Amino acid sequence: MDNTAEQKYTAEQYYAMTGETNQPMELHNGNIVMLAAPDIRHHNITTELFSKLRDYIKFKGGDCKPFHAPVDVKLDEYTVVQPDVFVVCDKNKIDEKRINGAPDFVVEVTSDNRLNDLVTKLELYNRFGVREYWIVDLKFERVLVYSFESGDYPIIYSFAEEAPVGIYGGELSIKISELL
């Protein structure tokens, strides 16, 4: 979809235009962003991450709900994202079609659009109240963990290291190398 610099789309316009498409896309500050389809490595990591989160939440009897793309997350009237993997703890944000408001925990696995995850989404997730944001950087085989509640600087883990999930007090740790 062509998007001129002057045209800003609302979330409702975005939903009307995209309908039932299978094309991965998002709305960032009123601009439609086309996303690349994930490769197999990306898919394997997101699938395994989702499974670990789901299993942990089930085992603990938690109230949070894990999701994986493609599920729309409407952050505001001009911003709709589809995080790779995320957890929502406020069930009032969940309706039949989408999540309305910031998830508590978000994981993005980098692909062809690395800067989107490293810059644009970092700013969006921080601004809209995501508590914890992980960037799984396939190029440099590292995980950047941002805990927006305690500071803006990331803690960086290699794929071989256990990265604690902060929203669970570090009780759950994930080693990316075991997901490959």
Image (cartoon, rainbow, N blue to C red):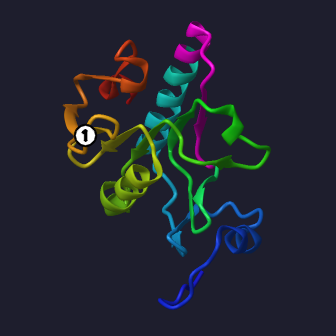
Q: Residue placed at 33% from the left, 44% from the top?
A: 135
In the rendered view of the protein, which quadrant contains the C terminus? top left
In the rendered view of the protein, which quadrant contains the N terminus? bottom right
At which x and y percent is residue 3?
54, 85
**Quarter of the image holding residue 51?**
top right
Q: Amino acid at mark 1?
A: Gly
Tell me which segment is drawn in magenta.
56-70
Which secondary structure, mark 1?
loop
- Above or below, 150 against 27 in this view is above
At which x and y percent is residue 179?
40, 27
Left/right placement of residue 92 relative to residue 161 reads right
Left/right placement of residue 47 relative to residue 99 reads left
Closer to us: 18 or 15: 15
At which x and y percent is residue 46?
48, 37
- Above or below, 166 against 98 in this view is above
Q: Residue placed at 42% from the left, 37% from the top?
A: 131
At which x and y percent is residue 155?
20, 35
Left/right placement of residue 144 relative to residue 5 reads left
Closer to us: 60 or 36: 60
Count neighbours of disc 1 (C-alpha within 10 A) and say few if under 14, some if 14 to 19, many if 20 or more. few
Closer to us: 12 or 19: 12
Q: Residue placed at 36% from the left, 51% from the top?
A: 110
Tell me if residue 11 is in the magenta stretch: no
Tally of marks: 1
Q: Residue placed at 31% from the left, 62% from the top?
A: 115
Closer to us: 155 or 21: 155
Instruction: Residue under label 1, please give it.
Output: 151
